[in-house]
Image: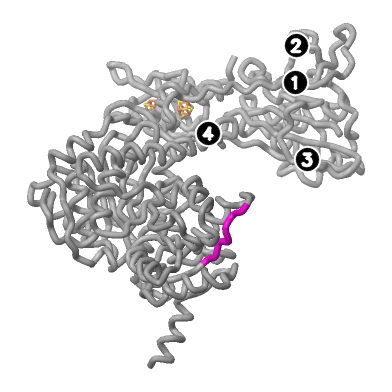
């Protein structure tokens, strides 16, 4: 049995990717299982999805804690989420990144593969510069480097089950298959036992889950940042009123100021700003 | 101390006043309404300096208490039957947020068919919500238990909400003499709540927000720990209360003439008084019977039941409700507490007094007769058997 864990952000398609993988594996005659783990169900929040692929019916219903393969749809998560937790030494780590896989070697004793899925997505008009839809390009790369499913099956699954733009998504998968690069980083260790999984267990002293929202910065969720053009701003307060995380304040003169530690990059302020003074820019 | 002739409902109101509750939120429902009406009078007349919050439903009444308790206030509400069922969701919030609310519940049958008689189905249906549950036998016990309930709920090892339950009409609308302690006595027994507030006015915070599988169970375990502290804490509280008032209600499972008893009946609420008299009658006939009153149903006093089982050969458990399981709810718990003990007694399940039917001395005699001869295992519907008897007599 092969166990896979996907890491992405709400809205990037990690859950769809793991489902498409299940459909593809089924077409190849395997027994798949796929399911998401939802925490706070909000755009931009880190999301995890799991897949298992076996030659016989999958007989376990738990989250994947010791994956053979980890797929990361957003390289920004590498710094914020312990994506390699439990990944077996010698296991496969596939990252959506324009970087060379050798540059990611510091992540651990893994087979590391990288695919510039954002560029592929844009080539096929999937999503926007600031929010490319990368899941199908990554799945194509997955077919190549994992050998667990065939590219034909991935394409067929996309054509049957992709929620939109099946032709472009199938083409993106093919490009991902072609473009993916695997690191040549010396000897890869034999597939070893699962590394221990550690969950930080910090309970509040009080037996009630009470905390100020001020102590829960949501900046981690952000892939886009609102940039306010004060030349167009009319100081109307709409951005402040609509921001779900109270991430906009005003200076003494009444100009809006972003509280970066709480902005989760949802883009609501930009959508609501009457003179279109707010642009959403990709995080550096 | 003053001796007044009070209904069970007034005993609740007087106790809440003596406890100097700070927030009362309530919605009327028969047969509870006179509890909160009297409290409204106390507040209007300036005898109780509390916030009295009128709400549009029982669900909101409990929400107000949960929020006020989170801010550190001592809170009270009361309800019954359908109103308690409507509160169900908030009952979990109260225990999960460790809100030390005390609530008077007048036990009333659940519709349909519509019925306002005494029946424990309403509170038994809330047994899994993390609330402590007391069932009172007399108006005196109602008053004393409400005062003890505040000490218990606010104890920092417990920090859980408490229901003080009384049978509809048999207590709620029955007047009898009640000793009302002096305010000074109560103040010494029950000082102001040491506010372990989870919220503070003017300080942004949130409670009960999203908690994933990594931590949720730890919070549930802490609620369980609070419940585990209830019975030892209650013992201390009762000792102190007895020292100040001379009254001791005997813990979670007070017993009567059980030491050499072959057969013991376990009762809840007002039927206990009638059953005690029957025990005396049977004792004069030389029959070795005894009685145990299940005063606390949550947390279930399993240790006390095992102590009872160590001497009695046969235990009959009377439930004033039926939960559509194999046995009555209390009978299930008693049998479970005794499971696997060598020489464990036979446990028989009786249903009596459902929907406000009288639990007469005759019915209690029949239960003891059954227990001493051939106790069945499944639940015996005593009310139905009694009905046949009424028909014959008619
Ligand atoms: S509304 Fe704007 S400022 Fe507020 S969280 Fe969303 S993107 Fe950030
Ligand atoms: S909504 Fe736009 S115009 Fe209004 S205050 Fe915010 S940035 Fe300025």
Residue A102 figure quarter: top right
Residue A269 figure quarter: top left
Dot 3 alpha-carbon crowd within 10 angstroms: few under 14, some 14 to 19, many 20 or more: few
Residue B375 horizontal/vertical position (percent): 56, 70
Q: What subunit carries mark 2?
A: A
Q: Is residue B109 left or right of residue A1?
A: left
Q: Which residue is mark 2?
A: A104
Query: Do the CB atoms of the residues marked 1 and 2 lie less than 8 Å apart?
Result: yes
User: Which numbered disc, 1 or 2, marks the residue that appears first in the sequence?
Assistant: 1
Q: CA distance from mark 1 to mark 2?
A: 9 Å
> Which label sits in the foreground, 1 or 4?
4
Q: Is residue A52 above or below residue A251?
A: below
The residue segment tinted magenta is B343-349
B351 in the magenta segment: no
Q: Nearer the viewer, residue B110 or B279?
A: B279
Q: Which residue is mark 3?
A: A60
Dot 4 alpha-carbon crowd within 10 angstroms: few under 14, some 14 to 19, many 20 or more: few
Q: CA distance from mark 1 to mark 4?
A: 29 Å
């Amino acid at each position: 049995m092969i166990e896979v864990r996907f890491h992405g952000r709400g809205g990037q398609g990690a859950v769809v990717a793991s489902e498409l993988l299940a459909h593809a594996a089924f077409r190849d005659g395997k027994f798949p299982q796929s399911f998401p783990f939802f925490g706070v169900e909000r755009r931009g929040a880190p999301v995890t999805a799991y897949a298992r692929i076996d030659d016989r019916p999958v007989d376990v219903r738990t989250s994947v804690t010791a994956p053979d393969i980890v797929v990361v749809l957003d390289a920004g998560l590498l710094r914020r989420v312990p994506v390699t937790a439990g990944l077996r030494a010698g296991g496969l780590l596939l990252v959506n990144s324009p970087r060379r896989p050798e540059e990611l070697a510091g992540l651990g004793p893994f087979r590391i593969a990288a695919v510039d899925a954002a560029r592929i997505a844009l080539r096929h008009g999937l999503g926007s510069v600031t929010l490319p839809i990368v899941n199908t390009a990554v799945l194509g790369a997955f077919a190549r480097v994992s050998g667990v499913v065939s590219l034909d099956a991935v394409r067929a699954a996309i054509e049957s089950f992709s929620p939109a733009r099946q032709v472009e998504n199938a083409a993106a998968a093919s490009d991902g298959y072609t473009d993916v690069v695997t690191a040549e980083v010396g000897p890869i260790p034999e597939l070893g036992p699962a590394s221990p999984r550690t969950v930080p267990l910090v309970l509040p002293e009080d037996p009630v889950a009470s905390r100020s929202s001020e102590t829960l910065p949501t900046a981690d969720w952000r892939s886009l940042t609102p940039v306010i053009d004060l030349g167009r701003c009319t100081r109307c307060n709409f951005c402040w009123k609509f921001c779900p995380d109270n991430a906009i304040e005003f200076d003494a003169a009444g100009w809006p100021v972003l509280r970066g530690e709480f902005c989760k990059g949802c883009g609501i302020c930009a959508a609501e700003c009457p003179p279109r003074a707010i642009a959403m820019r990709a995080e550096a | 101390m003053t001796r007044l002739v009070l209904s069970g409902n007034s005993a609740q109101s007087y106790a809440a006043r003596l406890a100097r509750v700070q927030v009362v939120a309530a919605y009327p429902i028969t047969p509870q309404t006179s509890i909160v009406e009297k409290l409204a009078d106390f507040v209007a007349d300036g005898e109780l300096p509390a916030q009295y919050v009128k709400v549009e439903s029982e669900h909101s009444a409990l929400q107000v208490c949960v929020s006020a308790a989170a801010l550190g206030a001592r809170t009270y509400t009361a309800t019954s039957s359908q109103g308690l069922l409507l509160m169900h969701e908030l009952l979990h919030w109260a225990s999960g947020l460790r809100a030390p609310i005390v609530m008077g519940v007048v036990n009333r049958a659940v519709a349909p068919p519509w019925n306002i008689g005494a029946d424990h189905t309403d509170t038994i249906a809330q047994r899994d919500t993390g609330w402590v549950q007391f069932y009172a036998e007399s108006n005196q016990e109602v008053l004393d238990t409400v005062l003890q309930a505040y000490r218990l709920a606010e104890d920092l090892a417990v920090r859980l909400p408490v229901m003080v339950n009384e049978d509809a009409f048999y207590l709620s609308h029955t007047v009898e003499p009640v000793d009302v302690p002096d305010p000074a006595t109560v103040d010494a027994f029950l000082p102001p709540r040491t506010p372990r507030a989870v919220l503070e006015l003017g300080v942004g915070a949130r409670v009960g927000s999203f908690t994933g599988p990594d931590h949720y169970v730890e919070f549930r375990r802490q609620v369980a720990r609070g419940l585990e502290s209830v019975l030892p804490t209650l013992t201390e509280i009762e000792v102190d209360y007895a020292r100040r008032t001379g009254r001791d209600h005997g813990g979670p499972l007070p017993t009567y003439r059980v030491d050499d008893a072959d057969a013991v009946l376990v009762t809840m609420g007002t039927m206990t008084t009638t059953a005690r008299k029957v025990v005396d009658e049977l004792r004069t006939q030389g029959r070795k019977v005894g009685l145990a009153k299940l005063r606390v149903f949550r947390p279930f006093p399993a240790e006390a039941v095992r102590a009872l089982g160590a001497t009695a050969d046969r235990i009959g458990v009377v439930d004033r409700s039926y939960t559509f399981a194999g046995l009555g709810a209390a009978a299930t718990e008693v049998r479970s507490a005794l499971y696997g003990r060598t020489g464990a007694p036979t446990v028989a399940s009786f249903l009596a007094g459902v929907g406000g039917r009288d639990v007469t001395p005759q019915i209690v005699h029949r239960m003891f007769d059954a227990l001493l001869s051939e106790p069945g295992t499944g639940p015996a519907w005593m009310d139905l058997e009694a009905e046949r008897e009424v028909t014959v007599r008619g």
